[in-house]
Amino acid sequence: MVAPLIRAVRRSTLVALAAAAAVGGWILLFERGEPDLEPEGTPVFDVEADEILAVTIRRPDEPEVRLAREDGEWRVHAGDRPGVAADQGEVDLLLQNVESLRAEREIPAGSGDGADLAAFGLATPELTVEVETAEGAGRAGFGDETPAPGNRYLLFEDAVLVVSAFSRNNFDRAAWDLSDRRLLRFDSPAARRLVLTAGRETVELSREDGTWRIVAPFRMAADPFEASSLAEKLLDAHMLGPIPAGSEVADPVAFDPPRLTARLDLVTGAEETPATATIRFGPSSASPAGVFVRRDDGSIAVVEDALLRDLEESVADRLAGVRSLDLFRFAAFRVNELRIEAPVETLIFRREDGDEGRIWVLEAGAAEPVPVDAAAVEDLLYRLNSTQAEDVAAEDPAPLGEVWTIAAREDAEYGGPATEETVTLTVADDGVGHALRAGDDVPLMLPATAWPEILLLIEEARVAATDP
């Protein structure tokens, strides 16, 4: 009984092997010796990128992905969910892939019935791409790789084609892959105002006459780099992933009240068109990990927790990290006048351009102006320019002491108006000074060593120059 059973198994195995060999040989027969349709292949869809109106990607058991031009912009739809803005770079790449898809050869006619399609993996393509133009639509489905490495079967309309095996990957795109992931979708944005509110606390930054200033909770000069960086955290923010369908966060109650609200006023594009965006931060997200935000149009996104933490910290410390602690912000080499109002006299240093370079002249009271050592004056200017406060002064009354006013006037830059910075200093007997810059509501606390050094340089700068 064993021998007949073995013979039967062998016969069935041989029959299966023969059938497989026949199919494989049949496929190889059609591929062997088939010339290229063109030296570089033939375009499959034969369309230009700018003619394409929509591209639809279908995969078994997955939502359909549709990229369509709507009202002049590209939007992505996943299944029956509302469309979202598409990333222009991803759009351009997908359209280029449609335009550049080329067939290396065609399987001869007569091999396209249902049984044959199954042999090529095309009875139910694993990925189908439909391209729509004003002239109609074309559909292509990707099947198995060919016995020859590096190629894959493609069903285009009723023809079985051979294309590069890697071309399928160019179209294997989920809706998220094609979506514009920017939190704020502006072209060439430039921030002009930022308002952050968390609970009852509000802080505000504003760019006034080209300079960033803190305007709430008090007025104070802002560090230009730190102020721009804080606004750019919002401008550069990207979404982390798609929102799961049916997520409870879609309920407006999830953002009532928001954990933090950020309002950004900006200009966008070459024409600097004014625009405003408001972002409301809500509950945490588990997948993708981050925090939910709601945009002006009501859409929900997930962003990094770090963005919320940075903004919350800026509110909690009242923009401490954005405050400018520089005593002056002038460029020393552009200053043309330095006025020092001391308790007993006023000193005015004026710059003149002589035949042998820069000359500084001192006017003190009713005395005739006298030339002074230019190097000493410029040492004083650089010391003033490089002096930084330790911190914003406490809200206690300013210390009792001498009151000095120092004002520096600069040459106009790039055809703009001349500028002047003024600082009023109250200096105690121990050298500790409070400095209030013009336009600020709160004074700065100078290091104890700063004022004695400045005072010494003032004395050196007022000494008359000696002839060489």
Image (cartoon, rainbow, N blue to C red):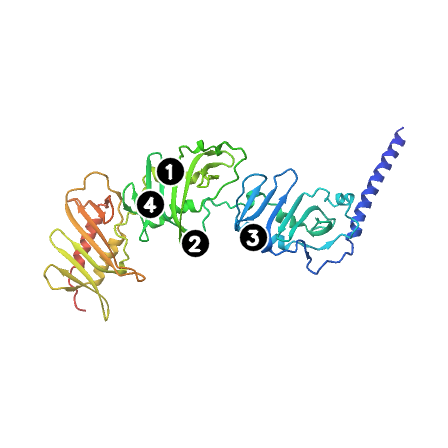
Q: Position of residue 3 (x, y in %)?
A: 89, 31
Q: CA distance from mark 4 to mark 3?
A: 37 Å
CA neighbours of label 1 inside 10 A, class few (<14), some (14 to 19), many (20+): some
Q: Judge by depth and name the residue closer to the eye, 230 or 142.
A: 142
SS for tag 2? loop
Circle 3 residue: 92
SS for tag 4? strand
Q: Position of residue 29 (x, y in %)?
A: 80, 51
First in sequence: mark 1 or mark 4?
A: 4
Look at the numbered discs 4 and 3 and tell me whether their residues touch, using CB distance below 8 Å: no
Residue 312 disc label:
1
Q: Amino acid at mark 3?
A: Asp
Give the quarter of the figure containing the N terminus: top right
Residue 226 makes an appearance in the image: no
* 418 over 156 or under it: above or below: below
First in sequence: mark 3 or mark 1?
A: 3
Q: Closer to the observer: label 2 or label 4?
A: 2
Q: CA distance from mark 1 to mark 2?
A: 29 Å
Circle 2 residue: 269
Residue 49 disc label:
none
